[in-house]
Image (tube, rainbow, N blue to C red):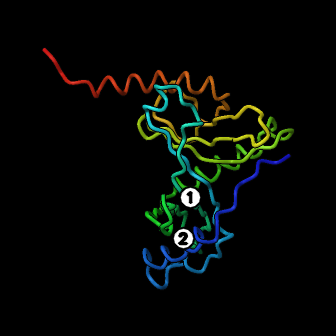
Amino acid sequence: MPVNRPVPPPEVTAALLKGLREYTSPRDPLLSLPPEAWLALKVFSLQIEDIIQKGGLAAAKPAGWRFLVDGGEASGGPAAADVAEAATGGQPRMISLLRDPLITNAIQSVHIVERMEQWKSQEYELRVVRIPGILVEAVWLFSPVGEPDWVIPTLRRSRQIKRLWPYPTGEFFEIAQSASERCLEFDKPYTN
């Protein structure tokens, strides 16, 4: 079974297209790309406190959608757009647009994870989880049928966390908890 990517709701796609018109010039090549050209990823966020309290992925909160494209020179180069979903009844809106060659690495990381052999026999939903407090972003393979979830870091600051290494969630959160505790040490007031 393949790794499935959720499809963004129509109002999220509409917010992407509206945001592109607002963030770019009328002749920008991104405006000519159809929505299907973008790699759409559902993004969740975890706070350090959630990790310290051992909430795990169950504590992750939906943060919106990330759209990635590497259309080459025809599209103006690699781009990433973030669309935030409104918490209570409001409309989603695009909150950022970034053009950077490093976006190609993010796209390649997602495709590498999708092709890993260990996911072929199970059903997983591909999600992204951000842990801004310890500067980690990872692919989260969520099992809708009760199999164990996996976390595969794509961006990380901590040397303890290996990039593109598939971690069972328990193992990942042991490492993340250690990194979180070290970060919280910096928040303590200085005393003589």
Q: Secondary structure at mark 2?
A: helix
Residue at left offset 80%, top offset 35%: 118
Name the amino acid, label 1. Answer: Trp
Relative placement, left or right, of 167 versus 60 is: right
Q: Secondary structure at mark 1?
A: strand
Residue at left offset 43%, top offset 27%: 180
Query: Where is residue 16, by image quadrant?
Result: bottom right
Query: Where is residue 67, by image quadrant?
Result: bottom right
Name the amino acid, label 2. Answer: Leu
Viewer-closest of 187 and 139? 187
**First in residue order: circle 2 vs circle 1:** 2
Residue at the extreme left of the image, as rendered = 192
Viewer-closest of 118 and 76? 118
- Label number found at residue 65: 1
Q: Position of residue 163 (x, y in %)?
A: 58, 35
Q: Position of residue 19 (x, y in %)?
A: 48, 73
Q: Is residue 132 visible?
A: yes
- In the picture shown, does residue 72 fall above or below 158? below
- Label number found at residue 184: none
Residue at left offset 54%, top offset 55%: 103
- In the picture shown, does residue 103 fall above or below 54? below
Crowding at dot 1, Cα within 10 Å, few <14 / some 14-19 / many 20+, comes out as many
Viewer-closest of 11 and 172? 11
Q: Position of residue 184 (x, y in %)?
A: 35, 26
Crowding at dot 2, Cα within 10 Å, few <14 / some 14-19 / many 20+, comes out as many
Q: Position of residue 46 (x, y in %)?
A: 49, 39
Disc 2, disc 1: CB below 8 Å? yes
Q: Which residue is mark 2?
A: 16
Q: CA distance from mark 2 to mark 1?
A: 9 Å
Relative placement, left or right, of 131 versus 189 is: right
- In the picture shown, does residue 161 fall above or below 62? above
